[in-house]
Image: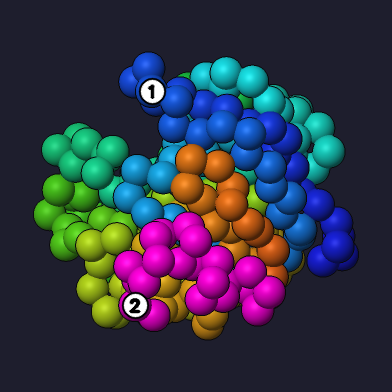
């Protein structure tokens, strides 16, 4: 795939969340091999846009195309890291158990774990720096370790397109650096990453493209073209944000 090839196309997307219209008429094209940041004020519909795109929230209207087709036809090529707060940390699972979940496929959930599955999970844990904690219960982990564990799960899937909902939220500096390195590594391998992100100061160094969202996609494209003082003020409210 070339960088010009579109791997995700949203057309007039509208999503309601708890009977409230959270997103309307959202249009977005994501080219292959980029890290795209989704930013905007609190309650702007950023996470809802991801969930609607992935079918986790019903669409009122509009469409989402993945690699030129529907999600059900390419689901194994798409990975998703949900918000940290949506995970049940009391669930009795080890770090390795969680990483292995990324190797599950449709129709295979109750199949025996293979040697290849374990290797993929082990490789993912090594990539996020958690090989030494493979047998630790997830409830015993720090916030940064927990986030890296669930990042390992999505890495074990070996997808081509990743959606990550605030992967840096609530993690320590070491985990931030590890996650950043993982994202850059995925991009170097040709994967595409779409992340909901709240730290505007890191957008220019982390992302290639950015989408400004406030109830719809206000603007989207290369960071150097879209991530301007004028567009940020327009999205967040004049002079409300420091960079």
Residue neighbourhood size for the residue with mark 2, other residues' Cα within 10 Å, grouped as few (<14), some (14–19), many (≥20): few
Residue at image x 24%, y 44%? 85
Going by the image, does 62 lie left or right of 184?
right
Q: Which residue occupies the foreground of this view, 67 or 36?
A: 36
Q: Disc 2 and disc 1: Cα gap in Å?
A: 29 Å
Q: Percent position (x, y) of residue 36?
A: 60, 62
Quick one: SS at disc 1? strand
Please tell me how crowded label 1 is: few (under 14), some (14-19), or many (20+) other residues with Cα within 10 Å.
Answer: few
The residue singled out by tag 2 in the image is 242
Q: Which tag, 2 or 1, sits closer to the chain's start?
A: 1
**SS for tag 2?**
loop
Q: In terms of depth relative to the viewer, which is nearer, 76 or 229?
A: 229
Q: Is residue 233 magenta?
A: yes
Relative to residue 184, is residue 237 depicted above or below? above
Q: Which quadrant of the view contains residue 3? A: bottom right
Residue at (65%, 79%) from the top-left corner? 224
First to last magenta residue range: 223-243
Q: Are discs 2 and 1 less than 8 Å apart at CB?
A: no
**Would you place residue 4 above or below residue 89 in this image?**
below
Q: Which quarter of the figure is the C terminus placed in?
A: bottom left
For this orientation, the residue located farthest to the front is: 238
Q: Is residue 137 above or below residue 222?
A: above
In this view of the protein, can residue 120 be seen by the observer?
A: no
Disc 1: which residue = 20
Q: Is residue 230 visible?
A: yes
85, 26: nearer the viewer:
26
């Amino acid at each position: 795939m070339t960088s010009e090839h579109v791997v995700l196309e949203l057309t007039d997307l509208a999503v309601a969340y708890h009977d409230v219209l959270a997103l309307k008429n959202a249009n977005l094209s994501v080219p292959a091999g980029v890290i795209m940041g989704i930013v905007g004020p609190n309650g702007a519909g950023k996470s809802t846009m991801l969930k609607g795109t992935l079918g986790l929230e019903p669409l009122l209207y509009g469409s989402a195309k993945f690699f030129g087709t529907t999600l059900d036809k390419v689901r194994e090529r798409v990975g998703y890291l949900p918000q940290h707060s949506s995970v049940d940390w009391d669930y009795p699972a080890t770090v390795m158990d969680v990483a292995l979940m990324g190797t599950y496929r449709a129709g295979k959930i109750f199949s025996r774990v293979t040697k290849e599955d374990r290797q993929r999970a082990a490789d993912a844990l090594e990539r996020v720096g958690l090989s030494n904690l493979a047998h630790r219960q997830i409830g015993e982990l720090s916030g940064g370790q927990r986030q890296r564990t669930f990042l390992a799960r999505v890495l074990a899937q070996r997808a081509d397109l990743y959606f990550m909902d605030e992967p840096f939220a609530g993690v320590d500096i070491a985990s931030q650096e590890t996650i950043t390195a993982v994202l850059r590594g995925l991009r170097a391998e040709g994967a595409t990453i779409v992340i909901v992100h709240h730290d505007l100061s890191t957008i220019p160094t982390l992302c290639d493209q950015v989408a400004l969202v406030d109830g719809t996609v206000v603007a989207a494209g290369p960071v150097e073209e879209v991530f301007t003082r004028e567009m940020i003020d327009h999205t967040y409210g004049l002079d409300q944000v420091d960079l």
